[in-house]
């Protein structure tokens, strides 16, 4: 087992406020790592730091042992790091197929054959030629994941993939995430939805106000008093 | 070859057959034009339409794929013209060699201008292009040693032969620039369907997602700007030899504004949009009997009116009429509306 | 450059900076509040200048009449522009920019149509010049510096101590705040356009008294005005004033060193460099909407 991702004492300050205040974490190869925490705990900032959209104030981010601080997102993609977005997750006026082909045009690969496979995996085969902005919400989510998969990532960061999904759709999503892991991808997922996330996570990290509150298996997390306090003390999302 | 790729817009009329017919008719009209016009001025205007058309198709490429407009294309045209004039006058370089050199020079300047777009976007970029245009004009005006300032530069000799291609008469120039424009249009269509074109379209749709998909957004936008600049530079090179005269006027922001106007009048989402816009701008004074200054006033008002009332351009308004009249059914649209 | 020349250029620079200030503050307020890049602001300024040419070309006490006429005229034009045109572009500020481009063509050529492209001269109301060592202090420039100072002191008080002024200042610096203020936003926007127009008109009038005017001047001043607004921080009035001072004095010193013809190009280049190094401006202001 090797460490695909490692974060050491990562900090990010915005005008005097520490959104991320000294985080250490790691993701082992082929595991599904969940990061949970209330709003404002710094999860999204952490994602933006790891995926290159923000520069750290201090600390290190390592991908397969190499420091990737400050490398822009498009170059991280080439190193096998991809992410999805919580909102505005597709290219609205392009067809589903054109959407998924974008990373391929970016990589200079000739074969577009993967696209059909990826569409199948994400349940979008029927919608192949429809414009992205005509898809129902759940399918748009899947499209975002499909686009990220088209970059052939080694590490995939999913940003609140279950947000706004009903129970059935959430279950399908959980299945999809497992299938993605079977394709050889390590996943880090952040979300609020504990019933969705805990069953599929190998390990869970709980964040609060920019720091790591607790780390363990799903069962450990559920038993931890402080975690329950933190969650019951905030509005459910 | 279907020139309208899935990811960019529908034609004026929905069906492919209708579209091909329209383009063929337009091409035929273009080819026959010199035989239909009776005056030298008419032919001259034809050449202008082709030259400006080249610039505006280049600008349209930038706008449709990167969503960026630029006021600097007048300056890029002027840079092409001045580089050519200087090469021809000081070094006796042939027109045919001037073309590629001016293209490279313009691409370089466009890259230089485009580089700030790495750091700034939207409004800032527009302001920068405006500033660049005025800088270029100031330099051309003041660097008297090189550019001859206000007086401008004069090229007396016509281009030499290149095999069968002779450029002595106005008609020669018309067919030459017409051919260049057609090539330019094809090139734009090909570019849009290329990997670069698709990346740029993605950037225009959602630049953050494009970046996260591996697209080097900033670099690609600069490349798009350089390509659109080359169009302007090549047109400027032809201008230098055709008009025999180069001066600082065309370098300023005004020319740039007029090019934007021509692009928007026709409606950039249509293949024929830029041409329609250019034709309107050039023939407007004839239709209304305007003096050049009055024409500029009319164009200014037209631009305001287009933005406020007809953002899809003249062709867009036309299409609305055609659809409303139930003449033609619209095909399903897939693609950005720019 | 010897001491007297330096003083001369410093003095001249202050007078030019005053005009830049008048143009730049209007731009920064409008841009900060609405996000609209109104490039026609330069033409507005020239409307003020040409109004003076029409009403009071010969200086003297008629100057007051000319000034009032210019400001009134331009305020009306600004009001009409905002209500009739820019109001419809608030949702998509890029359209406001394009509209302003059309206005440039229409207005500038309107002036050319009537006056041609040649330069016109206006006789200044104050013609005395005092000699102080090697430095010539012209009463007109002194007047410009003085009146601009008075205007901005008054304006700063307005911004700091009146309800409308406070709302304006806060909203220009932070567009989000605008909707939270008790003053209705559309009225605030109209007011900003009119105030900007008034300041620009005064700038144009003062400009006409020290330099010959031509219709093309608008383009030069508007780019500098935007440079000032960006460098000083969008919506930041104090920032714009400081940036205007820097620009005006730098240009004058530049001219003193013999690079007069190149001043414009150098100023523009400087602006581009600053934007590259620090896109948010030298001082804080509204975060530019990307």
Image (spheres, rainbow, N blue to C red):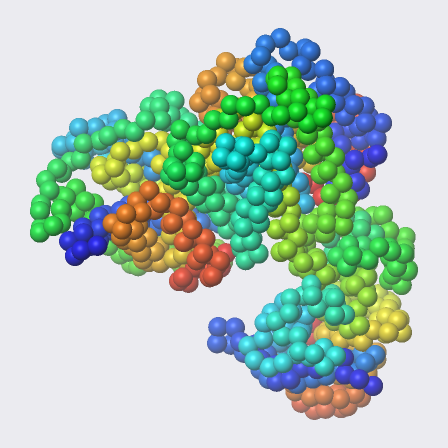
User: What residue is at 77 percent from the left and 25 percent from the top?
Assistant: B23
Q: Is residue C14 left or right of residue B107?
A: left
Q: Is residue C74 left or right of residue B63?
A: left
User: What residue is at 63 percent from the left and 81 percent from the top?
Assistant: A60
Q: Quadrant of the N terminus of chain C?
A: bottom left
Q: Is residue A152 left or right of residue A74?
A: right
User: What residue is at 89 percent from the left and 63 percent from the top?
Assistant: A121
Q: Does residue C218 sit above or below C270 in this rendering?
A: above
Closer to us: B106 or C98: B106
Closer to us: A132 or B282: B282
Total number of numbered discs in the rendering:
0
Query: How far from the left and from the top, in percent, is residue C257?
Result: 27, 51
Closer to us: C55 or B187: B187
- For the question of whether residue A112 can be seen, the reply is yes
Res A234 quadrant in image: bottom right
- For the question of whether residue A193 can be seen, the reply is no
User: What residue is at 38 percent from the left and 52 percent from the top?
Assistant: C228
Which residue is farthest front?
A: B91
Q: Quadrant of the C terminus of chain C?
A: bottom right
Query: How far from the left and from the top, in percent, is residue C23?
Result: 34, 45
Q: Does residue A213 sit above or below B21 in this rendering?
A: below
Res A195 quadrant in image: bottom right
Query: How far from the left and from the top, in percent, is residue A42?
Result: 62, 76
Query: How far from the left and from the top, in percent, is residue C276?
Result: 49, 58
């Amino acid at each position: 087992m090797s460490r695909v991702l490692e974060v050491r004492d990562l900090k990010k300050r915005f005008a005097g406020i520490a959104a991320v205040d000294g985080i250490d974490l790691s993701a082992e190869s082929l595991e599904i790592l969940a990061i949970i925490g209330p709003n404002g705990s710094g999860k999204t900032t952490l994602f933006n730091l790891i995926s290159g959209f923000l520069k750290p104030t201090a600390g290190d981010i390592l991908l397969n042992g190499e420091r990737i601080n400050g490398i822009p997102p498009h170059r991280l993609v080439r190193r096998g790091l991809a992410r999805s977005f919580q909102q505005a997750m597709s290219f609205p006026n392009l067809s589903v197929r054109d959407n998924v082909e974008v990373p391929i045009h970016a990589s200079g690969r000739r074969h577009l054959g993967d696209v059909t496979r990826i569409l199948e995996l994400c349940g979008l085969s029927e919608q192949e030629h429809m414009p992205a902005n005509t898809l129902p919400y759940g399918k748009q989510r899947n499209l975002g994941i499909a686009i990220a998969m088209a970059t052939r990532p080694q590490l995939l960061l999913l940003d609140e993939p279950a947000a706004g999904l009903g129970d059935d759709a959430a279950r399908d999503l959980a299945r999809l995430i497992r299938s993605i892991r079977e394709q050889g991808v390590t996943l880090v997922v952040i979300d609020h939805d504990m019933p969705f996330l805990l069953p599929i996570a190998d390990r869970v990290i709980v964040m609060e106000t920019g720091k790591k509150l607790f780390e363990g298996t799903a069962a450990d997390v559920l038993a931890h008093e402080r975690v329950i306090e933190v969650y019951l003390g905030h509005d459910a999302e | 070859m279907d020139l309208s790729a899935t990811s960019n817009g529908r034609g004026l009329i929905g069906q492919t057959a209708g579209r091909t017919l329209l383009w063929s008719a337009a091409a035929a009209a273009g080819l026959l034009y010199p035989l239909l016009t009776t005056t030298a001025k008419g032919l001259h205007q034809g050449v202008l339409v082709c030259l400006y058309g080249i610039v505006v198709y280049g600008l349209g490429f930038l706008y449709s794929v990167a969503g960026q407009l630029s006021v600097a294309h007048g300056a890029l045209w002027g840079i092409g013209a001045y580089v050519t004039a200087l090469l021809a006058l000081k070094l006796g370089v042939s027109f045919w060699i001037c073309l590629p050199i001016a293209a490279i020079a313009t691409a370089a300047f466009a890259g230089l201008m485009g580089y700030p777009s790495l750091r700034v976007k939207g409004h800032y970029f527009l302001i920068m292009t405006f500033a660049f245009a005025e800088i270029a004009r100031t330099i051309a005006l003041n660097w008297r040693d090189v550019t001859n300032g206000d007086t401008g530069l004069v090229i007396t000799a016509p281009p030499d032969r290149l095999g069968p291609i002779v450029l002595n008469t106005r008609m020669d120039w018309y067919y030459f620039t017409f051919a260049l424009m057609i090539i330019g249009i094809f090139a734009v269509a090909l570019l849009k369907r290329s990997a670069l074109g698709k990346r740029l379209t993605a950037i225009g749709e959602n630049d953050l997602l494009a970046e996260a998909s591996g697209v080097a957004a900033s670099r690609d936008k600069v490349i798009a700007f350089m390509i659109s600049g080359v169009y302007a530079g090549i047109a400027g090179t032809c201008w230098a030899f055709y008009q025999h005269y180069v001066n600082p006027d065309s370098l300023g922001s005004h020319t740039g504004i007029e090019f934007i106007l021509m692009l928007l009048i026709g409606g950039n989402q249509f293949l024929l949009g830029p041409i329609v816009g250019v034709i309107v701008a050039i023939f407007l004074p004839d239709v209304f009997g305007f003096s050049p200054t009055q024409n500029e006033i009319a164009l200014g008002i037209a631009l305001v009116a287009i933005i406020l009332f007809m953002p899809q351009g003249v062709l867009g308004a036309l299409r609305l009429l055609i659809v409303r009249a139930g003449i033609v059914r619209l095909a399903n649209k897939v693609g950005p509306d720019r | 450059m010897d001491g007297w020349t330096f003083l001369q250029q410093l003095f001249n620079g202050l007078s030019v900076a005053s005009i830049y200030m008048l143009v730049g503050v209007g731009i920064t307020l409008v841009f900060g509040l609405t996000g609209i890049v109104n490039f026609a602001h330069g033409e507005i300024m020239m409307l003020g200048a040409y109004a003076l040419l029409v009403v009071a070309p010969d200086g003297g006490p008629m100057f007051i009449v000319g000034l009032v006429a210019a400001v009134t005229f331009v305020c009306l034009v600004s009001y009409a522009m905002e209500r009739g045109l820019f109001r419809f572009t608030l949702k998509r500020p890029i359209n406001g920019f394009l509209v302003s481009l059309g206005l440039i063509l229409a207005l500038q050529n309107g002036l050319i149509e009537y006056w041609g492209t040649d330069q016109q001269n206006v006789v200044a109301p104050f013609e005395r010049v005092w000699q102080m060592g090697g430095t010539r202090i012209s009463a007109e420039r002194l007047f410009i510096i003085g009146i601009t100072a008075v205007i901005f002191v008054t304006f700063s008080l307005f911004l700091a101590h009146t309800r409308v002024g406070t709302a304006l200042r806060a909203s220009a610096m932070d567009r989000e705040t605008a909707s939270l203020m008790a003053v209705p936003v559309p009225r605030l926007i109209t007011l900003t356009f009119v105030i900007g127009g008034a300041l620009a008109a005064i700038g144009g009038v003062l400009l006409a008294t020290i330099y010959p005017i031509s219709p093309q001047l608008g383009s030069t001043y508007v780019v500098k005005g935007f440079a000032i607004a960006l460098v000083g921080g969008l919506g930041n009035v104090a920032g714009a004033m400081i940036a205007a001072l820097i620009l005006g004095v730098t240009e004058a010193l530049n001219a003193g060193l013999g690079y007069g013809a190149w001043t414009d190009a150098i100023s523009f280049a400087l602006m581009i460099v600053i934007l590259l190094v620090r896109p948010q401006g030298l001082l804080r202001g509204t975060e530019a909407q990307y």
